[in-house]
Amino acid sequence: MEKKHRNTLAPWTYLSTEFFDLESRLFKNHWMLVGHISELSNPGDYVTFDAVGERAVVIVDEQMQLRGYHNVCRHRGAQLLTDAGHCKHRINCPFHGWSYKLNGTLASLPLPDTFENLNKEEISLHPVKVEMWHGLVFINFDADAKPLAEHLQSVEAEVAPYNIANMQPIIDKYDQLKPYNWKVIHDIDNEGYHVPVGHPSLQQLYGQSYEDRIENGIPISDATINEKPAQLWSVRHYQKLLPEVEHLPVHRQKSWWYIGLFPNTVIALYPDMVEYYMTIPVSVDTTRYIGRAYALPTSNRAIKACRYLNLRINGITEQEDESFVSDMQEGMRSSAFPEPTLSSTEQGVLHFHQKIQQHFPVATLRSEPAAGTISEVNTSIASAGK
Ligand code: FES
Ligand SMILES: [Fe+2]
């Protein structure tokens, strides 16, 4: 008899617009990285964030508190702020000029007497949860979301010495449109089994020691830089130049490691800098790929050279991954696309797929349900499993 359920995601879950509409919820009830405290250092500084139809702004109020709001005017829904920047004392709507204090309350509006029964005091921007974790700023559209720090508690002590909150950006934020389903990008990223063949520079940098593991529900990839000098120029010089980094413990002096934050973010920690990258889906086959690197201010030339080389090594890796992602996305249309046979070193892929299946049990099905029924089938599998 044909197997109906599977513990990895079938290709249809990457190609179905209907499933995409369902899984988009993940971006409304998980913590989303919106920026870094260096962008939010004065009252009125703000960053914005858009995903799957929702819009948020995080702004510093007069008391230096971070405030999160839906970036939606209470009058007729216009977008209040764009990109990142600074507003002086007021958030002004560009449409008709309603004006809000930084604490979200409505301060003034043109022609107030022309509105019947409008009580200014009762109107405030709708709040969005905000949390800062080691200088990284996150929002959650779900008012009942559990604190992010709780989820990340087991890596807290390991991350603290990096002092991310005192870092500054060392590159512009990138925000690129990619022609893939968002999950394919994570499927490639969630395992290091492809490193020896797919990423010669990473292999030469840390190939011997690379390991993926799931620790307290958090995917961690951990590697130590090889002693043996690499053949590749960037890697060899990085190995040679990397100085002792005073603020890090011995076991992190030569460590490249990565923390996965379901569903869409990776925080990468290197001795010389820290970076994040994340996906935001736009449609079933279009995804924004966003990221930025940060580092502590320094006048140490060796560290600066290492940052340059690090960005270069990661740039090469990204190009290599791009071709695997594109190939895999294409391959999913093939009738011979396999149910994957996973190595024990690819557990990160399985973990990611099972997390999606826990949220959306319809994604355990091997074949796509009939058009128009995916949400309904999902609900019935979920209630049968209770
Ligand atoms: S929509 Fe903002 S003032 Fe009208
Ligand atoms: Fe890769």
Image (cartoon, rainbow, N blue to C red):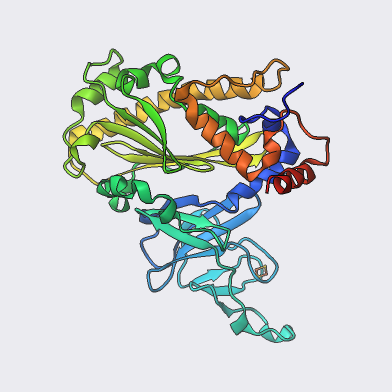
Nearest to the observer: residue 144 or residue 227:
144
* Residue 314 in view here: yes
Q: On the picture, is 99 further left or further right than 314?
A: right
Relative horizontal placement of residue 133, taking residue 322 as reference (left or right): left
Asked which quadrant contains residue 340, the reply is top right
Question: With 317 as the anchor, is 55 left or right in this view?
Answer: right
Q: Quadrant of residue 364?
A: top right
Q: Position of residue 384 (x, y in %)?
A: 73, 45
Rendered position, 374 above or below 132:
above
- State the quadrant of the N terminus: top right
Is residue 319 in sight in this rendering?
A: no
Q: Residue at x 67, y 32 (%)?
A: 14
Q: Which image quarter has ligand 1? A: bottom right
Q: Nearer the viewer, residue 258 or 302?
A: 258
Q: Position of residue 231 (x, y in %)?
A: 28, 12
Residue in the picture at 59% in, 84% down: 121
User: Which quadrant of the view contains residue 355?
Assistant: top right
In the displayed structure image, the side of residue 29 where residue 364 appears, left or right: right
